[in-house]
Image: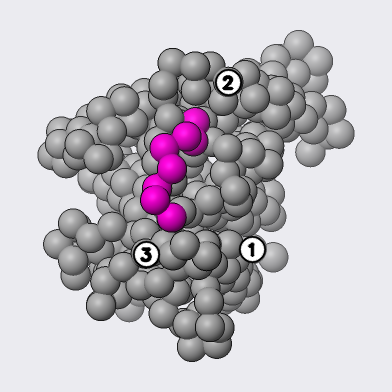
Amino acid sequence: MKIILILPIILSFFVTLITIPFWIKKTKKIGMVWEDMNKYNHPKNISGSGGLIVVLGFILGVLCYIAIKTFILNTDITITNIFALVTTILIIGIIGFVDDIFGWVHGGLPAKLRIFLVFFAAVPLMVINAGVSEIAVPFLGVINMGILYPLLVIPIGIIGTSVSFNFIGGYNGLEAGQGILILFSLSLIAWLTRHSWVSLMGLCMVAPLFAFLFFNKYPAKVFPGDVLTYSVGALIACMAIFGDFERIAIFIFIPYIMEVLLKLRGGLKKQSFGKPQEDGSLKMLYKKIYGVEHLAIFILNKFKKKVYESDVVFLIYGFQTIIIILAFIIFRNNLF
């Protein structure tokens, strides 16, 4: 990648860094504030839907990339693929923002309607027949999915990643940090497999996530909202599809597969939060484990007398990092 292509990444970072304080101020002024459920007495003073600014930073970074490739480098920029990807992120970001406005306390968008709407976010990728229809299946070898790839695999991928990425959250800095870890690793994979434009798309989201994390880390001043989690989840699927590394992406997504299974154990009704104490520590909210977050609290309780919110976040970061390292080891023949 030419050095000038760092500019879109820098732009997306600083747009987010500069705009978030304004967003925090305005949302508090209009009362768009949410409860911090892992704090004692659940103070309702945290700015909501800050992920909208992250998506804005991402979009401006991508448009800057297109401008550089068009007017300065005069090279092919696979513009159809890029605009299909951007359209998908915009559609799903709007869906996430609407879900935020309705509020998770009141159930947000009905589950069936949410999935129906997210399906439309996959349409831009479906109509351009994105990705490669040949998929390597364990024990069966390479299977050509043909028309079933755009009609079945793509929407399942977009729906699955966007919805499930929303499951691991509710802790200061967790969603943004997880997004950074996963998208950076996929960007590296895309670069190693010579899909440089896909790598740039990932980094254009990693940069604003870093800027957002300054305000979202413990103690958070702003929450991401579904507008961020849906968008990051959809981008993960887009990168896997355009980069043709679905298997590696699925492996890296193992913590979220675990989360879905644990959530199903609770009938998708159990919350991921801990039970906050007056001293700022957390205890198990339920007797059983219904999420990776609960599992983290359970494990930490074996080694610490008091478990704090940041402990849970860093343990999940650590678990995700181990999964990423294992992915590079297991799939190294596909990368180097």
Give the farthest residue toward the bottom. 302
Q: Are marks 2 and 3 in contact (CB under 8 Å)?
A: no
In this view, the mark in front (1 or 2): 2
The amino acid beneath tag 2 is Lys
Q: Can you identify the residue that label 3 sits on?
A: 275
Q: Is residue 61 visible?
A: no
State the image coordinates of residue 291 (x, y, percent, origin top left): 33, 67
Whether residue 309 is in magenta: the answer is no
In the structure shown, which secondary structural element does the residue marked by tag 1 occupy?
A: helix
The amino acid beneath tag 3 is Lys
Q: Is residue 307 above or below residue 57?
A: below
Please state the extent of the stretch shown in magenta in the rendering: 40-47
Q: Can you identify the residue that label 2 sits on?
A: 25
In this view, the mark in front (3 or 1): 3
The residues tagged by marks 1 and 2 sit, at their Cα atoms, a distance apart of: 45 Å
Mark 1 Cα-neighbour bin, 10 Å: few <14, some 14–19, many ≥20: some
State the image coordinates of residue 218 (x, y, percent, origin top left): 60, 51
Q: Can you identify the residue that label 1 sits on?
A: 335
In the image, what residue occupies the spot 52% across and 73% down? 307
Mark 2 Cα-neighbour bin, 10 Å: few <14, some 14–19, many ≥20: few
Q: Quadrant of the C terminus?
A: bottom right
> Foreground: 96 or 287?
287
Q: Quadrant of the N terminus?
A: top right
Q: Which mark sits nearer the N-terminus, 3 or 1?
A: 3
The amino acid beneath tag 1 is Leu
State the image coordinates of residue 6 (x, y, percent, origin top left): 79, 32
Q: Is residue 114 above or below residue 301?
A: above
Q: Which mark sits nearer the N-terminus, 1 or 2?
A: 2
